[in-house]
């Protein structure tokens, strides 16, 4: 079978060559190639270099050893098979004039042992041809910096897109062959329990019952043990009057009690409200009232905080350090309760995640029905090296969308989760070392705290097992990304999104090396566009409000209302710009921009500049009223330990790097910046800090 297709791209051939020069990168840019691993990793690409290549051909995966037989820079790469199926491939570049290049992909293969006869070949040819065409479009999109168009109504295109999603999931091990009896049991579990977290643990107990599911300060629990524990808890909660459709508030840190509460509620068909562990008592009371919470599962340390909120509700202890509290503990319930599977509910329980609440009372973000696409998991698995059976150190709070989404995906992948109630940077490194963790899920401030450890402390722990450090939840400064990769290797992945829009963009190590400070390129299945204040698209390189479209947009706040929308895309509340390579740079919140003397100033640009100063550990900036200029910028700076800087020195530093109108009029030195549990700076608290000469 022979396939050939071409596309014209508005770039010079040298630029296009950079993308295709290394065959080891083809799984990222060619959708039908699942692997292209060099036989000699240290050898440069060229004639004679050999690679172990695997291809998706219809429903089969075929391949073998191939050898590069032509390699002419900026023009041609061709290969033939050495072992395995008979295959030949060629990628050709030809200048078309006026800054354009023609890219041609040609491939042929013959696998009589796998692709049986002309009928199977006719069936697989359209799929491979569609993959080639789709790959050409993706290469064009990446080189020209244009966005991926939204999925249209064409059912063939949708089918091809979902087939590609399945390929991505299969590569990660989420879709894998297994015994027929397990397949039948898993299918039955999916039909009975639907799209809920209950399905995740039940399927995990079928696929790998003895595999550790979690390791916390109390020890290790397997998938089978967690399944049985949550059966017992669900049955006891039902006996205590918690019903299908009720809402359970979960006020727990990262430990087995969080999983017990979440999964047992799902088995009841009850909804779960994830409460922020940094809430004050009035916030807990107000949110539980607004969200009509029927029961609260909480950690003993929060006993006094829930005194009012829990006064008229059922209460259960998720974690306890003593016997002072009289409420029943989930541990005791798990030991005493009936461990048989409860009857499946008539509805799948939903999870409500609260927004960060940096500007007021947090809102509950609820999602609609399960999206009819595999884009949500594929958007992470496409670029982050996550796969089945990894050990994952989750540092990000599980009550936050970033920690929770990684838990949900990891449960589907059969991951083992290493959890701690509180984040300690040295303990995190010790956990990675002791448990050979391959993945770290964190928020940027956690990475910063690890880098603040002395060289002596960091050198005590072997972190070479890490292949993916997944960061999100707040802005990732460019210097932090670079310092992390210099210290721990090219394993950092940064996701930009929000509770409301889910994944928007994803930055790989290559993105952050090429453009420090970038939030990356649009995630799979997401459209990201910028609009000005009049709702008009902004030109390349210009600043605009960030809008996102994908299958995971939230359905609105539980108390009513939603986010601004344009052309079916939803506002994130941030402003940013795209560079020439279609990489997004988030410049700050759209409500934080100030106008000083008629000039627009975005605090984040000033914050990043101050943070680059050798004496500054971190910085934040806000706008304050000014009689002469309307508004002026005030900066708050935390100095690095043992280093000094003056207000005038830092103002001069900003002046050397930015326009004069961006220089903060005041620089206040503070011991630390107020942050929420996900690392976001609470600027409303900074606005209340008194300026010395104003008191």
Image (cartoon, rainbow, N blue to C red):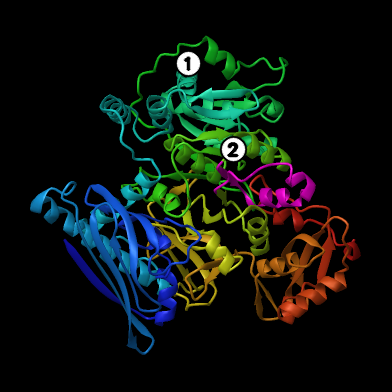
* Residue pictured at 37% horizontal, 25% vertical: 206
Q: Quadrant of residue 75?
A: bottom left
Question: Helix or strand or loop: what does disc 2 sit on?
Answer: loop
In the image: residue 165, left or right of residue 533: left
> Can you identify the residue that label 1 sits on?
232
Residue 272 position within the rendered picture, expressed as x and y whole percent measured from the top left: 50, 33
> Can you identify the residue that label 2 sits on?
436
Q: Indicate which disc, 2 or 1, sits on the residue closer to the N terminus.
A: 1
Residue 675 position within the rendered picture, expressed as x and y whole percent measured from the top left: 70, 50
* Residue pictured at 44% horizontal, 58% vertical: 523
**As rendered, which of 76 and 278 lies closer to the eye?**
76
* Residue pictured at 41% horizontal, 25% vertical: 205
Is residue 250 a member of the stretch shown in magenta? no
Please rate how many residues cluster around mark 1, counting C-alpha atoms within 10 Å: few if below 14, some from 14 to 19, many from 20. many
Tell me which segment is drawn in magenta.
Answer: 438-467
Name the mark nearer the viewer: 2 or 1.
2
Please rate how many residues cluster around mark 2, counting C-alpha atoms within 10 Å: few if below 14, some from 14 to 19, many from 20. some
């Amino acid at each position: 079978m022979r396939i050939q297709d071409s596309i014209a791209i508005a770039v010079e051939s040298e630029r296009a060559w950079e993308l295709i020069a290394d065959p080891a990168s083809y799984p990222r840019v060619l959708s039908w190639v699942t692997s292209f691993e060099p036989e000699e990793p240290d050898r440069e690409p060229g004639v004679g270099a050999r690679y172990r290549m695997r291809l998706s051909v219809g429903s089969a995966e075929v391949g073998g050893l191939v050898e590069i037989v032509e390699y002419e820079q900026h023009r041609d790469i061709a290969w033939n098979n050495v072992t395995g199926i008979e295959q030949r491939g060629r990628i050709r570049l030809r200048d078309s004039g006026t800054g354009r290049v023609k890219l041609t992909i040609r491939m042929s293969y013959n696998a009589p042992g796998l692709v049986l006869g002309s009928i199977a070949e006719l069936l697989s040819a359209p799929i491979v041809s569609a993959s080639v065409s789709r790959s050409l479009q993706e290469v064009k999109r990446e080189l020209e910096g244009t966005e991926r168009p939204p999925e249209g109504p064409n059912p063939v295109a949708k089918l091809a897109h979902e087939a590609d999603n399945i390929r991505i999931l299969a590569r990660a091990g989420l879709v894998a062959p297994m015994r027929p009896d397990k397949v039948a049991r898993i299918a039955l579990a999916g039909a009975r329990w639907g799209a809920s977290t209950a399905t995740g643990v039940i399927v995990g107990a079928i696929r790998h019952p003895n595999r550790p599911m979690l390791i916390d300060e109390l020890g290790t629990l397997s998938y089978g043990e967690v399944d049985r524990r949550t059966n017992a808890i669900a049955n006891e909660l039902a006996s205590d009057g918690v019903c299908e459709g009720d809402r359970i508030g979960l006020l727990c840190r990262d430990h087995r009690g969080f999983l017990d509460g979440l999964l047992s509620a799902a088995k009841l068909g009850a909804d779960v409200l994830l409460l922020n562990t940094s809430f004050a008592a009035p916030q807990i009371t107000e949110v539980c009232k607004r969200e009509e919470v029927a029961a609260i599962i909480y950690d003993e340390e929060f006993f006094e905080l829930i005194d009012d909120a829990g006064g008229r509700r059922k209460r259960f202890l998720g974690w306890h350090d003593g016997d002072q509290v009289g409420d029943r503990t989930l541990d005791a319930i798990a030991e005493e309760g009936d461990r048989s599977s409860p009857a499946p509910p008539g509805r799948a329980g939903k999870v409500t995640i609260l927004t960060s609440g940096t500007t007021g009372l947090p809102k509950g973000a609820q999602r609609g029905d399960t999206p009819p696409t595999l884009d949500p998991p594929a958007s992470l698995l496409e670029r982050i090296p996550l796969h089945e059976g990894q050990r994952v150190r989750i540092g990000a709070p599980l009550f936050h969308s970033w920690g929770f989404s990684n838990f949900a995906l990891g449960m589907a992948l059969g991951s083992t989760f290493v959890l701690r109630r509180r984040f300690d940077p040295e303990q995190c490194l010790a956990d990675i070392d002791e448990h050979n963790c391959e993945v770290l899920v964190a928020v940027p401030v956690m990475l910063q705290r690890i880098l603040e450890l002395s060289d002596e402390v960091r050198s005590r722990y072997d972190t070479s097992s890490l292949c993916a450090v997944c960061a999100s939840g707040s802005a990732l400064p460019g210097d932090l990304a670079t310092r992390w990769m210099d210290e721990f290797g090219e394993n950092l992945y940064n996701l930009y999104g929000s509770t409301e829009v889910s994944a928007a963009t994803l930055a790989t190590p290559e993105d952050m090396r090429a453009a420090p400070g970038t939030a990356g390129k649009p995630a799979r299945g997401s459209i990201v566009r910028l609009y000005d204040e009049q709702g008009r698209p902004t030109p390349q390189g210009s600043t605009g409000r960030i809008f996102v479209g994908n299958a995971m947009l939230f359905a609105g706040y539980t108390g009513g209302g939603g986010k601004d929308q344009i052309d079916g895309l939803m506002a994130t509340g941030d402003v940013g710009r795209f560079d020439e390579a279609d990489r997004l740079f988030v410049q700050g919140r759209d409500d934080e921009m100030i106008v000083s003397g008629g000039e627009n100033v975005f605090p984040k640009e000033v914050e990043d500049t101050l943070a680059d100063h050798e004496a500054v550990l971190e910085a934040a900036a806000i706008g304050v009223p000014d009689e002469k200029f309307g508004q002026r910028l005030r900066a708050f700076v935390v100095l690095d330990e043992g280093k000094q800087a003056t207000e005038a020195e830092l103002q001069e530093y900003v002046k050397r790097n930015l326009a004069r109108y961006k220089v903060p009029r005041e620089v206040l030195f503070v011991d630390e910046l107020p942050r929420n549990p996900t690392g976001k700076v609470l600027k409303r608290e900074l606005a209340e800090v008194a300026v010395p000469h104003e008191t």
